[in-house]
Amino acid sequence: MADKTYKDKITAKGTEIAVISRKNDDDYISLTDIARYKNPAEPNVVVANWLRNMNTIEYLGLWEGLHNPNFKPLEFEGFKNESGGNAFTLSPQRWIESTGAIGIISKSGRYGGGTFAHKDIAFKFAAWISVEFELYVIKDYQRLKADEGNRISLEWNLQRTLSKINYRIHTDAIRDEIIPKKITKVQAGAVYASEADLLNVALFGMTAGEWRTKNPDKSGNMRDFATLEQLVVLSNMESINALLIRQGLPPKERLVQLNNTAITQMKSLVGGKLTKRLE
């Protein structure tokens, strides 16, 4: 669960169910909340009873085998052989610790805690409780993802527009401070292109021409395929570069400063491995 996450919720037949939404769409849904539909007072008992079932253990083992290279098959076989017996009990914590499972997670805390499971597993649990209830869970989850997609699209378009506005500020600074007077439009265009590529190299690690060479089948330009975070940083960099231009800094110095800015801001936004610092 190292990816950036945020809490959301869905509602199925009047039951509110927490969802941990992740960027890669591997969302985790609260089994504890789903269980409240059947037993509001003791949802953990419902989850525990489900885990005692042989079919449940087999399904969890198959899921982990497909998605988890660190899953422990011997420990799983032990649970599968014991499952279904009158004396067999299994808590989510024991399942996770013994097998190295990632499909189910246990979160502590009075608010927002409980047992969560990958959506594939959560839907299976909801079906075990009630097939009708499962359909309501899936329907509202689909509504949540549709709303999320619309929100992301709106944010992306907003940042794209902001980037275009800042691009005008950027080009005005180039016209005022870099482009010599009385040059041809072709010469001016060449200067603008070089400044645009200065930003491209600082943020994306390549020029627009290099990107097109690597992506001959894609239409548009590299900025059309940028992430929301990259567009935010690009917008900031255009304003910063305009200021550096007016201060009279040469391109080489600006490139280093802009690359440092890109690295710092992208670390703050996404925290992953980023464009290498320029030598």
Image: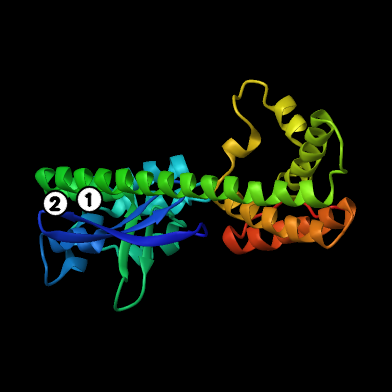
Q: Which mark is residue 234?
A: none
Q: Is residue 48 visible in this depiction of the protein?
A: no
Q: Residue 271: horizontal and vertical position, in percent?
A: 61, 60
- Secondary structure of the residue carrying numbered label 1: helix
Q: Amino acid at mark 2?
A: Ile
Residue nearest the observer in this picture, 33 or 62: 33
The image quarter in which residue 266 lies:
bottom right
Which residue position holds label 1?
Answer: 125
Point 79% across, 31% down: residue? 185
Residue 144 horizontal/vertical position (percent): 28, 49
Outermost residue, bottom direction?
A: 110
Q: Which residue is mark 2?
A: 129
Report the front residue among 31 and 74.
31
Q: Amino acid type of disc 1?
A: Phe
Tell me how far mark 2 sits from mark 1, CA to CA: 6 Å
Marks 2/1 in contact by CB < 8 Å: the verdict is yes
Q: Residue 3: x percent and y percent?
A: 51, 57
Please, what secondary structure does the residue beneath circle 2 have?
Answer: helix
Query: In this view of the protein, which residue sits in the foreground, 181 or 13?
Result: 181
